[in-house]
């Protein structure tokens, strides 16, 4: 059993990490920290875990020795957190946005300040197993990508890698309220956030830099909050290069994902669920991808879906940990999602 | 044109008062107060009113002279507010819970303290036109009842008045999130409040005292928050007195409500909407009532539905104002609700 | 009082027409037809109208003489219906897709057959008052545009007319379930249709031809069903022509809509509702439009929102009728929408 | 590996059985039948199972030999189905309502006809492990109780068994749309079923007979459809016998459920989730129970929650099968549910 700790355990990503790790046969969760809730039971904030754990939160400074650490929020402005990210001898998974952009100049542009610890950027391996599995086998610092970025990259990368599409793509991201976290403000009150189609990032969402970095494409992103708690869907418009056939697109996806345990290429011709639908993925570690193509106009619509807290967050982290530790990659990630829901 | 002011205009009840009063041909809204948002446009917080008004909030102390005043929140701990309630020469509508219970002892029991201005209780007329229309014609201080109380009283009073039911009734109240107001806390975050069946008041909800006061019955109430923004439904279990027939029950409702403009007795035998359904009433001033009766067991289920912000709040206030001013009672209250929704 | 009849009164558009016309001071609704429900009360299918009408459906062949007729569904395959559309001496509003495309070749491409009555196409005036007000004053046959088309055209036309954008635009349409009508099949069951982000028309939705026809742009449309009953939002990506400033875009909208009673240009800088949000418009005849612009990249995001059954259907028809009859254009269309909801 | 077959695999209960059994290490699913969809892939109707199975439906008459059979719908009017229920040599789980009521007279009263196979009633063991575990160890015919009945029985039985409450209880059941099944009609269209508080069984719901049969209490039930796909909550009003303390109630629950793997007694004092909340249980096999008690009035509110398709259906069947086969009772039932959702 390896010893795992969660720095920032009281948020939604912390809750999903706990759910998965408590059911992981190789992992013992030794601590979850919370400054505000130190001493309070973990299942007070994560009531779905009642009966599964007697753990209580500890203050960050009480975190015991761990083999594996998960940081759920930005640590850059906290010296202890930064030291934690930089420490070696353990494996660190960072689920914040701190280390996602490799280029400090990109960070500056999208986050409006100098990166406080640029020396960490080179070390961090992206926690997206489908693209970085080999590097993850030996990584000591893993940066888990953003939820909409993960869906977009998985939907686009096979096409970009095979040079089937032109560089400029537009990404329409839709996301549920859990993406705003457990301590969101008035704008996330039920009466305000229900029934919305809230365009909260019309142009230039931060995740577009991640997508461009990973795929080499020129991605332009718009993001809309929808009336869902969980779930991300990205609808990407691309233009195929001249001569590209539907068969070529399908072949590129098959080549990329035929052996991937957590990416499904949806290729039904009919039915309500012939394109990726996030509601089927709640709690699951799948990313579903699919597309529609009009060869005459070369218009290509690519769609990706996932659960923002799982394959878009905690699930990617656990899958990366499984790879890093040499375990079956699917361990503790077996839940397939529900229908109907 | 009479001059109307709203003390506490930035909340949800304030917004509904504004929507109705801005469309009222006899009323000029001269001011809406907000301590926090003084100087900001009213349509910033009530975006459905964009294009209908250029009003901005004023600080409470800047409230100009008005003929009619609406208080949307408790004034008991604010000397100026209490003075406002007590002042005569204008007509005051209080939509808080301050003046709903006539008996200070009941107030003490349900609100956990002495009533700070018991002298006001005797003056206040209940703003439920169906029971107090005649008193409302001359009232200078009107206390609008609670949303679940209004639905329950309208559903029960004809039966109680005709002595058709035994005293003990149980009330199962269901209410949407707007009942918690525009400044509710973490428990009302979309991710927490969505999909709920949250029993927030298992026994002894405050509104049960209002119901008993109005009907003379011994009401016991349970309240559940449901995944809706607006809407109240009360499902009341009662026991008919021996010998009571379905026809007698129907006759009691007809007698009470045949001429009421805003209470509909739903008596369909079939269909999805054969019992009162709050979703049909969003934005409308109707209270729908209906029932199911098993004469053999004398089990009687009485159901009431309304929009908590309209007939359960602002609409009752405007209807009461119309009566008080001698206008057509239905003025500015004509919206019938939507289907489907 | 003019006499109005609704051919096909039992569907959702029929219900909205009834709601508005029953509250219209110049109109008497003399009949609503339904083959299936002939003889049954209108408020059985439109329960929000209980207490407002005692009308029952009549069979189509029993339709009495009317001054104004509304057709809610396709009449092309019904000889009586076609005769109704062609008859003169009354004013006809067609809310189906039959007469929306002026060019029979476009109809053939999008509807997969020859148009059965091409002679009607030239006569039909588009029921979008903002573009066709003058023609509507004398029109005897009005074709009300599609819901997503209406939102897109109103959002794009000022920019196209002022030649501020390049021709190619992509339209991402989102629509609630009421767009599928009251007799939709298994795919619209609550358990299947809830929580969806259902890409049902990935490329080439029919409404894109309407948008191109009205604006002269080359529109490419994708449509997604979202978890809402009512509401349409279109999010349009366009590219501004070189040198176009934000001020120029704003000026074009102001010029087009400053005097329009039912188009609001949303230009808030902050807040949850700074872009058009359909939930604020349920039951209202507003179309809200707004935009975000990045002058450096010339990326322009244009957003439109409306209620698909009102400004995207029945409301446009009633507004067109008001114009045709010389009444105040806003008659019976005063409901502003609700917040919160 | 035992061989399992599902008779009626295309419905929602069939889908949940498939989800669980495909993940069960001791079970091979050899067939799922569907008359309508014979030859079509199982994951066409259960899209959450894509990638997990290549199974296609077979016609009922093609069902191969199985060790365990699950019937998801009524078989009483189908001779082959009845023969299947009566056959011995295999273990049969019936998830329909056919065999739930032991007394043919009760069946007649609640289902309006004579029971066509009363000889089966005596053989059938109720598939509620918490009450019938010992009988289940040897049962060959198991009748899984109704969803609202399961929740009510688990919430009430400890109190009834310890004689802590008076006989008359009222049950307010709330249920999501999946309870109506995958082939429900127009009344379950998204536009009609969304946002509802639909009192569909005001008095005398069939499940009340099951509750009374299991607990010996005189249960009176009301059922409301709520805007959820999955989930059942029952809110039960009971009257404690004189002298009963809160501690006694708590002790009764503890005694009954301390060792039960799938019943959790929720006993938090504070927080949003201090009473059983079905949204936390989606996909999980837990039934959560809790209560509120006012000793002075002896009013007792008992609350139960579960997922109607899992602990209220397929999960109870699988748990019963695990018991019958001598396996760990929790096998394939490990998913704890999600938060937030």
Image: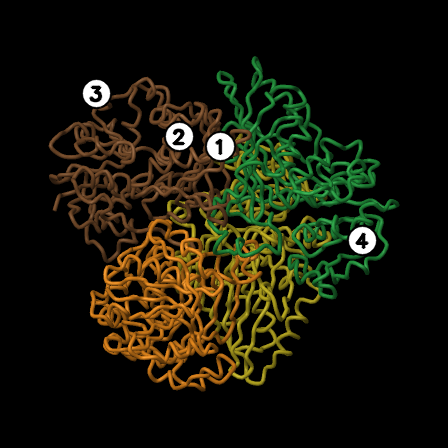
Chain colours: A green, B orange, C brown, D yellow
Query: Label 4 belongs to which residue?
Result: A80
Q: In the displayed structure, does residue D87 sit left or right of residue C129?
A: right
Answer with mark 3 or mark 1, whichever residue precedes in sequence. 3
Residue occupying the point 29% across, 55% down: B336
Number of the label disc, if any, that sits on residue D71: none
Query: Left or right of C272: which side holds B132?
Result: left
The image quadrant that residue D17 belongs to is top right
Labels 1 and 4 in the same subunit: no
Q: Is the residue marked by circle 4 packed among few (<14), some (14-19), or many (20+) residues within 10 Å?
A: few
Mark 2 and 1 residues: CB-CB less than 8 Å, in contact?
Answer: yes
Task: Residue D260: name its quadrant.
Answer: bottom right
Q: Secondary structure at mark 3?
A: helix
Label 1: chain letter: C
Chain for disc number 4: A
In the rendered image of this protein, does residue C232 appear above or below residue A274?
Answer: below
Q: Which mark is residue C159?
A: 2
Instruction: Single out the mark in the foreground, 2 or 4.
Output: 2
Q: How far is mark 3 from mark 4, CA to CA?
A: 78 Å
- Read off the chain for label 3: C
Q: Secondary structure at mark 4?
A: helix
- Answer with mark 2 or mark 1, whichever residue precedes in sequence: 2
**In the rendered image, residues at marks 2 and 3 fall on the same chain:** yes
Quick check: B218 above or below C308? below
Residue picked out by circle 3: C119
Neighbour class for label 2 at 10 Å: few (<14), some, many (≥20)?
A: many
Q: Are marks 3 and 4 in contact (CB under 8 Å)?
A: no
Compare residues C234 and C199 and report the one nearer the observer: C234
Q: Nearest to the eye among marks 2 and 3: give it.
A: 2
Measuring from the top left, give residue D227's x and y in whole percent. 46, 53
In this view, the mark in front (3 or 1): 1
Seen at 12% across and 40% down, the residue is C64
């Amino acid at each position: 059993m390896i010893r795992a700790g969660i720095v920032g355990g009281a948020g939604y990503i912390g809750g999903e990490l706990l759910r998965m790790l408590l059911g992981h046969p190789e992992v013992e969760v030794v601590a979850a920290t919370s400054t505000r809730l130190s001493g309070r039971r973990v299942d007070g904030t994560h009531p779905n875990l009642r009966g599964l754990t007697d753990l209580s939160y500890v203050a960050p400074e009480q975190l015991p020795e761990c083999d594996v650490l998960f940081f759920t929020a930005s640590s850059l402005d906290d010296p202890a957190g930064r030291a934690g990210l930089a420490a070696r001898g353990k494996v660190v998974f960072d689920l914040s946005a701190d280390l996602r952009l490799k280029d400090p100049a990109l960070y500056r542009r999208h986050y409006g300040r100098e990166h406080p610890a640029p020396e960490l950027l080179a070390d961090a391996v992206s926690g997206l197993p489908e693209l970085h599995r080999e590097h993850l086998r030996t990584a000591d610092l893993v940066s888990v990508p953003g939820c909409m970025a993960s869906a977009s990259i998985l939907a686009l990368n096979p096409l970009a890698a095979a040079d089937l599409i032109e560089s400029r793509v537009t990404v329409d991201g839709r996301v549920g309220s859990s993406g705003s976290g457990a301590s969101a403000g008035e704008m996330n009150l039920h009466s305000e956030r229900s029934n919305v189609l809230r365009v909260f990032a019309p142009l230039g969402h931060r995740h577009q830099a991640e997508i461009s970095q990973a795929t080499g494409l020129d991605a332009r992103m718009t993001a809309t909050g929808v009336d869902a708690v969980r779930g991300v869907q990205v609808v990407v418009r691309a233009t195929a290069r001249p001569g590209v056939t539907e068969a070529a697109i399908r072949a590129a996806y098959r080549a990329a994902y035929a052996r991937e345990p957590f990416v499904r290429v949806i290729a039904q011709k009919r039915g309500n669920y012939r394109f990726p639908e996030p509601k089927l993925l709640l709690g699951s570690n799948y990313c579903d991808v699919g597309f529609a193509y009009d060869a005459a106009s070369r218009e290509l619509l690519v769609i990706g879906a996932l659960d923002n807290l799982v394959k878009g967050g905690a699930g990617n982290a656990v899958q990366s940990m499984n790879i890093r530790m040499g375990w079956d990659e699917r361990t503790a990630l077996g839940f397939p999602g529900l229908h109907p829901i």
